[in-house]
Image: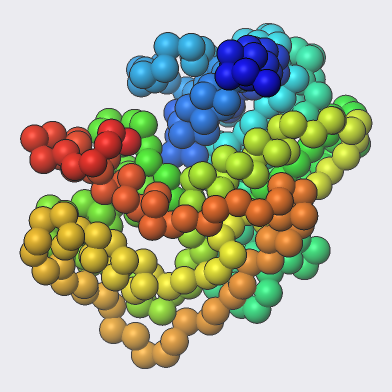
Amino acid sequence: MTNKNSCLISAARKDGRSPVLVIDGTGHVGASLCQFLSARGHPVTAASRSQEVIFDDPSIERLELDVLAHSNPDRLPSSKVAIIVPWVQQPDDVEHRPWLDRLVRLLVGAGTRSVIYVSSIWVYGREPRGCLTESMPVAPTDPYGSAHVANEASLTKCADGLGVDVAILRLANLVVPDPFFRSRTKIAFTHELMEMALLNRLIELRSPPSTPRNMLPGSLFHHDIGTLLDRRPVEGRVETFNLGSASTSTMINLAKEIAVMAEGHHGNRVGIKHPEELEVQPQFRLDTTKIRQIAGPHVDDLSGELSRILRQVVSVRDPAAVIGKPV
């Protein structure tokens, strides 16, 4: 087969990708996801409360949408798949609780058949221990985890009542460059640590050094979600997946890796400060067998993602010192 024919077939496949609506498409998770989906060939609409931030990719459509408001559009853009990634910590106000049910009904009315909900591994508690499998009981210990548990339950009911296909993704700590990093008032914690190492020559941890963290490289997350997007929808199906790295690290090990990268960039030693630790924090292992059986193996490259974040921080904070290729 000639290269010309290969390119034609590739373009045809790209043009045939289904439209995707990303709820909170400008957030930490959603923004990089929108970029990935657009590059993969999906027509993408990024919905969020504000339309102020603009993607460099002009093909990504924007939609103003507040999931907690009652004054949203009566009809959403037609898309077979919707990905919901909101940062939602609901109050104990009954008035706010039906937001997800309202949203899914709007989506189904617009033709959505598959919903992917980005949850969190913190549904297992803020100090999980042992092997975390999707079948173990959830045990949230803070409002963030509790909100995700409530949303997972709401989606399960929607799948049964509305016949929509639901995939729930319990995400570990995502490590990926952020296209809106320069305009954030609150940046992702890996970006924050990298800034400390580059600008202050000192990383100050707020958590004890042995605090466990499973770090999910963005490329691995995108590979897995792409596989789920390609599946044929099944009416009323609900599946839950743990998405994370094959290994769990600690805050001190992450800080050390970031410090070494920063030292290689500016040539100065980077110190690390952390709270005094009276006892070692409990460890956990995130079982990702289920998603790996469906998505297959993929590169689990944390160092590569951190290198891209380093280049991004340098390009924003000190454009004259940009190293390597653009992020």
Point out residue 222 in the picture as x, y percentages from the top left corner. 57, 40
Point out residue 154 in the picture as x, y percentages from the top left corner. 77, 41
| Residue 94 visible in the shown view | no
Taking depth in this image into account, of 11 and 217 the one nearest to the observer is: 11
Point out residue 269 in the picture as x, y percentages from the top left corner. 11, 69
Point out residue 93 in the picture as x, y percentages from the top left corner. 61, 41
Q: Please state, as top left, top right, bottom left or bottom right, where the N terminus lies in the image.
A: top right
**Residue at image location 47% in from the left, 71% down from the top:** 249
Q: Relative to 277, is 227 above or below?
A: above
Q: Relative to 22, is 90 above or below?
A: below
- Report whether 239 appears left or right of 64: right
Q: Please state, as top left, top right, bottom left or bottom right, where the C terminus lies in the image.
A: top left
**Residue at image location 81% in from the left, 24% down from the top:** 113
Quarter of image, res 42: top right
Quarter of image, res 321: top left
| Residue 187 visible in the shown view | yes
- Report whether 299 appears left or right of 240: left
Taking depth in this image into account, of 174 and 160 the one nearest to the observer is: 174
Q: Relative to 305, is 282 above or below?
A: below
**Residue at image location 47% in from the left, 23% down from the top:** 49
